Every structure is written in structure tokens, then in C-alpha cells.
Image: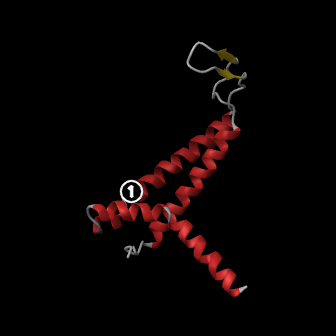
Amino acid sequence: MATSYDFPSDLLAGQAELHEVRAELSALLKRLPWSVEPMDGFSDDNGWRKVERPASPGWTPDEQAQVEKLRARERELAVFVTTHRYWSELSGADVVEARTRLKHAHETQQAAQEEAQEEGG
């Protein structure tokens, strides 16, 4: 049987926010132009595959600030989660297993909530 980990609520909240911040940052970066600075487009077919980029208007100061704010928060949360006092209670392979479980704790909670709704509805 798999070990059950009793994660502290602040650690669960930190991990959940880290997932949210990373998703928000990823979505933002996909919407932004490929280059932070304005750049001409280019086409290069001298490598093993052809690479093409359209001209990039660059990022606005607001977009740059938004990316930096999200990256800073991501770093803060990553440090909080990885250095949390909870990890000192575990050793060896238990740390690895618990860390993996924590990364997926939100999925487990969602599945439990959906199952409860199905039973009650």
C-alpha cells in the first residue's frame, strides 16, 4: 500500500499557487512576441532544419514587468516549497516520493471533489 503523507496546509497552498503561477507564466509567454527586444524576421535553412521567425515588435514595458513579476513569484514559491520545514521530517526515498505526491496533490483533490459531486448529485 502506498504511503500517505500529511502535508501541512501552508505547503499544499504554496504548491498549488506554484502550479497556478507557472501556468499563468506559460500562457503569457505563449501570447507574447518571440523576442523581448524588437527584431527583424529571419529565415535560416543552413542547419538540420529550417528556422523561421516573423518580425517581432518586442515586449512592452508592461509585458516585461508582468513576466518579471510572475518569474519572481515563481522563484519565491519554489524556494518556499523546497525548503519547507516539513521535508526535514523525511529522509531518503521518502523525500522523493513525498515530493512527487505533493506535486500531484491538486489532481488528487480535484478527483476526490468530482467523485463527491457525482455521488451527491
- Looking at the rendering, which quadrant does residue 60 occupy? top right
Q: In screen coordinates, is 97 left or right of 65?
A: left
Q: In screen coordinates, is 35 left or right of 96?
A: right
Q: In screen coordinates, is 50 left or right of 15?
A: right
Residues 98 and 18: in front is 98
Q: Position of residue 63 (x, y in %)?
A: 67, 38
Q: Position of residue 88 (x, y in %)?
A: 29, 65
Identify the residue at horizontal 47%, vertical 60% (top origin): 103
Compared to 86, does 24 lie above or below? above
Compared to 54, does 118 lie above or below? below
Compared to 19, does 61 lie above or below? above
Q: Residue furthest bottom?
A: 120
Residues 95 and 7: in front is 95
Q: Position of residue 79 (x, y in %)?
A: 41, 53
Identify the residue at horizontal 65%, vertical 75% (top origin): 114
Residues 48 and 14: in front is 48
| Residue type at the position of mark 1 | Thr
- Looking at the rendering, which quadrant does residue 94 occupy? bottom left
Q: Position of residue 47 (x, y in %)?
A: 56, 16
Disc 1 is placed on an element classified as helix
Q: Quadrant of the image for the N terminus?
A: bottom left
- The residue carrying mark 1 is 82
Q: Residue furthest top?
A: 46
Identify the residue at horizontal 42%, vertical 72% (top origin): 7
Could you classify mark 1 by the number of other residues whose Cα lies within 10 Å: few (under 14), some (14-19), or many (20 or more)?
few
Q: Quadrant of the image for the C terminus?
A: bottom right
